[in-house]
Amino acid sequence: LGGPHVQMYIGARGGVQLLVDLFQNDLEPAHMHLTALRAFSLLLRKCPFNQTIARRCGLLAAMRDGLKDTSADVRRWCAHVLLIWIYGVPENILEAKTDPILIGRLESCVSDSWATWVTNDAAEMLQILDLVDLNLEPDESAHTPSAAAGPPLSTSLLSRLRAAFPANAPSGQGQGAPMPRPPPAPTTAGAGALRRASMPAVSVVPATAPPRPAQSVPSSALLKPAADLRSAPPSSTAATEAANALDQIARFRQQLV
């Protein structure tokens, strides 16, 4: 996509809100809804800036409605987007945890076929939300303050979540558990082009390495292994072939020097 700066630029220019409106528009065809979901996965991946904007734009409500869509593809992509959306942002995790409808729809989505996906993102989402404890009241009868007891139980939930889910690095290199990956590319040409756009960037290595400075190597040091090999028994053909190869390498390197 161009890196975190391009992600934030699109989000600041209203790109996230545009995608939310596009996805919630029932007049749009189904393939446009899938296109919006794939674009969400790119804009929100390891980008707390856009993840926060998406929360304010009502992404949770849009994805929650998408989890009851008649298309299994839309349901799976909605779960995938939600999993990316909560990653590393405690406020998003808290909003998802306190939603009274989301858990039930995620449980229904778990039973969908995820054979073409790397993981069942609906199940992953439920496991993360299950780790969040909304009971913030300290149990005075069971807790005895001590120096080694750590922070008090009255610590706010957001503070605990920030400690459990470190913030994302601005450079795009996230911390903690690896990000979920979308499914393999579809077979159709148009969908394949969309999937190639969502693939992570890879570093390009130059085809030719810079030349190394020539170093003077004594010819005796190069020819000594060949002489040692020739002293082996005559029946050792492998040793003779190796000695000839070393001789050729030695002559070649002498020409370079």
Image: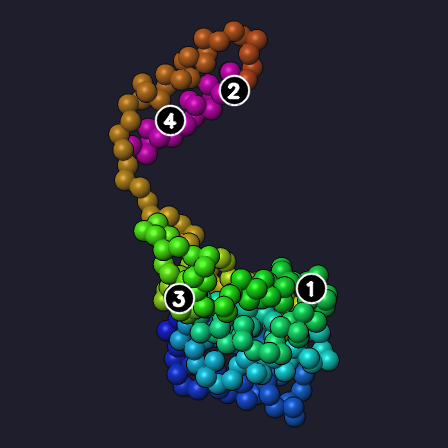
Q: Position of residue 34 (x, y in %)?
A: 62, 78
Whichever of callouts 4 and 1 sits on the residue coming sooner in the sequence is 1
What residue range appears in magenta? 239-257
Q: Nearer the viewer, residue 180 or 35?
A: 180
Secondary structure at badge 2 equals helix
Q: Position of residue 58 (x, y in %)?
A: 51, 84
Judged left or right of residue 240, residue 148 is: left
Q: Nearer the viewer, mark 4 or mark 1?
A: 1
Q: Position of residue 180 (x, y in %)?
A: 55, 63
**Residue under label 1:** 114
Q: Nearer the viewer, mark 4 or mark 3?
A: 3
Q: Amino acid at mark 2?
A: Glu
Q: Residues within 10 Å of mark 2 (few under 14, many from 20)?
A: some
Secondary structure at badge 4 equals helix
Q: Amino acid at mark 3?
A: Ser
Could you tell me which residue is drawn at 45 percent across and 68 percent down? Answer: 137
Q: Answer whether labels 2 and 4 touch (C-beta < 8 Å).
A: no
- Magenta stretch containing residue 245, yes or no? yes
Main SS, magenta region, reads helix
